[in-house]
Image (tube, rainbow, N blue to C red):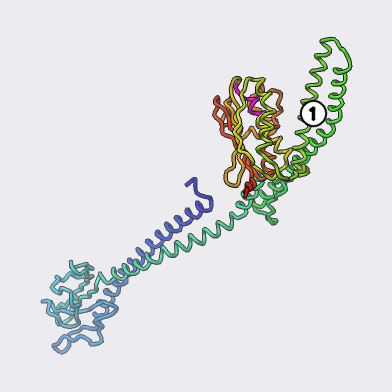
Amino acid sequence: MKKLSITLRVTLWYTLFMALLAAVALGFLFHAAAQSAREGKRTLMHSMVADSRDEIEYKDGELEIDRDLEAFADGVYLSVYDAAGVPLYGFVPRSFDNSAVFADGEMRTVGEEYRWYLYDEALAVEGYGTVWVRSVTAADAVDGTLAQLLHWALLVLPVFVLLAAAGGYLLTRRAFAPVRRITRTAREIGAGGDLTRRIGLPAGRDEIHTLAAEFDAMFDRLQQAFENEKQFTDDASHELRTPTAVILAQSEYALANTDPAPETRAALETIHDQAGHMAGLLAQLLLLARADKGRQPVTFGPVDLSELTAMVAETQAEAAAGQNITVHTDLEPGVMVQGDETLLMRLVINLTENAIRYGRPGGWLRITLTREETRAVLTVADNGIGIAPEHREKIWQRFWQADPARSGGGAGLGLAMVRWIAAAHGGTVTVESTPGQGSAFTFRMPAEKPSVLM
């Protein structure tokens, strides 16, 4: 039940309630109708017998029965007998066993194969003696009529229940349409990150419209907060580039043109290294900030991804050797793509730097590039520390690091940039990892068809 939507749950309960209510009402009505029908027949039987009292008399030595005495009415038969049970007037149903013993003033049900309601009354006729007046009607006829009505009711009832269920479902679905709109908008915002989307329900006073209006107001505030954050990151990155460049230049000049004491030189080298690290960090922040605003240019052109990856692998081999990590490459030649060469180079560099940073000393780094149908597939794998399952989505967040102690000076922006570059090229980047055994990052993007030499 919990897995069903609210619309279906409401419809189901509504239908069950309607079916139960209809069944109870139908049962009550048929019980009342049966009682009423039976009581009506018995009343008619009593009435016909009572009417016969004024129609039977003994006159001039003969028993006279008025021919106006009604012997049949609405399924009730009337007959008159003398004290010995000899029929004098009227008739009985063909299937009725007329040998039934008379019982004065008693309403009975007799018969086995056929059931009958039977009522007898003894009348004392002055000058003649006792005569018996008997009324008979088929009990099965009453019950049969009710059974037929019940049969049709049971055929019609499901139709009405289904119509009620369909109507209830449509009404409930329409009532919950604003909720589905809220859910769809929230899902689209979450999937696409477009905070400009709004639910936009028309004005209304009910709880759902009020909730939608509050959501839209919250989205307005969130959008403003994100815009402010993007603007701050952009402004801060831009403004800090100049002083960082000055620090780099001055420390480099001091190291190259002066002969400071060893302690001073060590301090200058530390300042120069950290300024270089800061300059790289600011460059990445500025790129991501411009990407968030849609102002980061992406220049597409033919790129030999095989050649680019080989060049990056050769460059990163020296850094890997510093940690005693062996770099292996398996690159399919001539894999051409349409993309921004600088950004694609940054993507490959970030993936390899990440593998080296979190690699196992004395381990290996494997870079493979293949063409799979219409896509280029680049995989950077290592046998390093791996990534815990609960961290696999967090690694794409900015400034998040699984193991800060082993970041090697990283700021946690590399993989965020990788994901953006992949998306900007119509591609995807995924990760497979086992803690303690290593990770494999796979980048896929559209590839150009290989040229055919004639």
Q: Which stretch is magenta?
A: 353-360
Q: Main secondary structure of the magenta part?
A: helix
Q: Which corner quadrant of the image does residue 439 belong to?
A: top right
What residue is shown with label 1? 279
- Count numbered badges in the picture: 1
Q: Where residue 388 appears, x then y in whole percent?
A: 57, 29
- Quarter of the view holding residue 160: bottom left
Above or below for 356 versus 73: above
Mark 1: amino acid: Ala
Circle 1 SS class: helix
What residue lies at 32% left-to-right and 68% top-to-bottom? 146
Horizontal and vertical percent position of residue 236 = 82, 33
| In this rendering, position of residue 332 left or right of residue 101 | right
Q: Is residue 355 magenta?
A: yes
Q: Is residue 312 above or below residue 251?
A: below
Measuring from the top left, give residue 387's x and y in whole percent: 58, 29
Residue at 60% x, 55% y is 177
Within the image, what quadrant is residue 432 found in?
Answer: top right
Q: Nearer the viewer, residue 303 or 414?
A: 303
Q: Residue 326, how many percent across, how many down?
A: 61, 24
Give the class, few, some or many, for how many residues have Cα within 10 Å of label 1's Cα (few <14, many ≥20).
Answer: many
Question: Relative to residue 85, is residue 290 depicted above or below?
Answer: above
- Check the image and name the residue furthest to the front: 454
Which residue is farthest left? 84
Magenta region includes residue 158: no
